Amino acid sequence: MPGRQVVTTPCKLNLHLGVHVEKDERGYHRVDSVMLPVEPTDSLVVEDADELIVRHEPALAVPAEKTTAYRAARLLGEALGVRPDVSISIVDRIPERAGLGGSSADAAAVLRALAQRWDVDPLDSRVVETARRVGADVAFFLDPVPSLMVGAGDVLAETFPELVGLPLVLVMPRTEGGVTSECYAEFDREPEEAADYEPLCAALRAGDADGVAAHLSNNLASAAKRLAPVVGEAEAWLLSRDGVVAGQVTGSGACSFAICESEGAARRIARSADIERGWWSKAVLTVGLDSIFC
């Protein structure tokens, strides 16, 4: 499939994140995670080139060769026996160090685009295995629908009906927090038992938004808040707002999210976070696969 491809990819929220003290042979913690695709989205353009080129806008602080997008292209080329001679231009709207999975989303979008370009099913076992090699959350973004992931958070256990149009607000303080490796190390110093994810999964199977709101959990959040207390401050501020149904820190932070009573409430809270606190904020909706083009 030569020529020009345009791809968009959502970010994710962890409705449930359960980290366990056990680790696999790769040194990854056992993790169970229930994730939901949401806005904002990153966009990618893939075109023919003489060699592999990856550009990010705005530019990242690391060389292109160190990015997950570059690694994904290189590893998939090796797995399929194809030279990844393409130019990949990525417009990043998903903030870094947020717990929203931005770099994983970009890597998966590259894998999906190149798989289709090379006439391979994006869910082919070789593509999925490459996703797992790139990073724990990457496999989720190959088919970003509400999902339960197990293993190290990289093995699909169950998918759920799309929960499209749920109003949410994202709030993230200006902080250097949200480094996943540091957060997991802090968790190891003071482990916290994971919640049972089955009540949340039951609510998702039933399409019960109220049930989803009632069973949010993240046992990595305490570690994130110890490392960067402003993350806890932002979460507490968010949960105190009128119009919030439920919320929590997502992933290892630094972003928190809240399910809201209405889109208007979400927009109002986002404006308040920006004006009153100077925090990055965005009113968003959950998205479905029809929002993703490849």
Image (cartoon, rainbow, N blue to C red):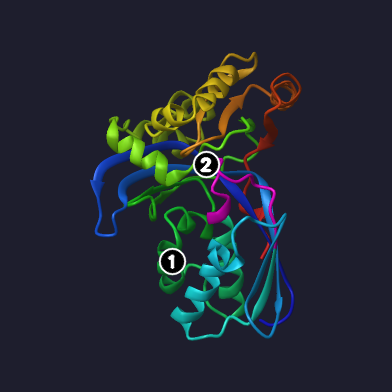
Q: 173 or 268, which is in the foreground? A: 173
In the rendered structure, the answer to whether residue 229 lies left or right of residue 118 reads: left
Q: Residues within 10 Å of mark 1 (few under 14, many from 20)?
A: many
Q: Is residue 41 above or below residue 68?
A: above
The dot on residue 128 is 1
Kindly tell me whether residue 14 is visible in this rendering: yes
Task: Tell me which residue sits at (44%, 31%) in the image.
Answer: 227
Label 2: which residue?
99
Point out the image quarter for the N terminus: bottom right
Q: Position of residue 223 (x, y in %)?
A: 39, 31
Q: Main secondary structure of the magenta part?
A: loop
Task: Tell me which residue sits at (72%, 76%) in the image.
Answer: 47
User: Mark 2 or mark 1, which is nearer the start of the sequence?
Assistant: 2
Q: Position of residue 78 (x, y in %)?
A: 46, 81
128 in the magenta segment: no
Q: Is residue 212 above or below residue 92?
A: above
Q: 67 or 248, which is in the foreground? A: 67
Task: Tell me which residue sits at (57%, 64%) in the image.
Answer: 69
Task: Tell me which residue sits at (56%, 74%) in the image.
Answer: 115
Q: Is residue 245 above or below residue 143?
A: above
Magenta stretch, residue numbers: 90-104
Point out the image quarter for the C terminus: bottom right
Kindly tell me whether residue 143 is visible in this rendering: no
Q: Is residue 176 above or below residue 45?
A: above
Q: Nearer the viewer, mark 1 or mark 2?
A: 2
Residue 58 occupies quadrant: bottom right
In the rendered structure, the answer to whether residue 119 lies left or right of residue 199 reads: right
Residue type at tag 2: Gly
Q: 207 or 27, which is in the foreground? A: 27
Q: Residues within 10 Å of mark 2 (few under 14, many from 20)?
A: many
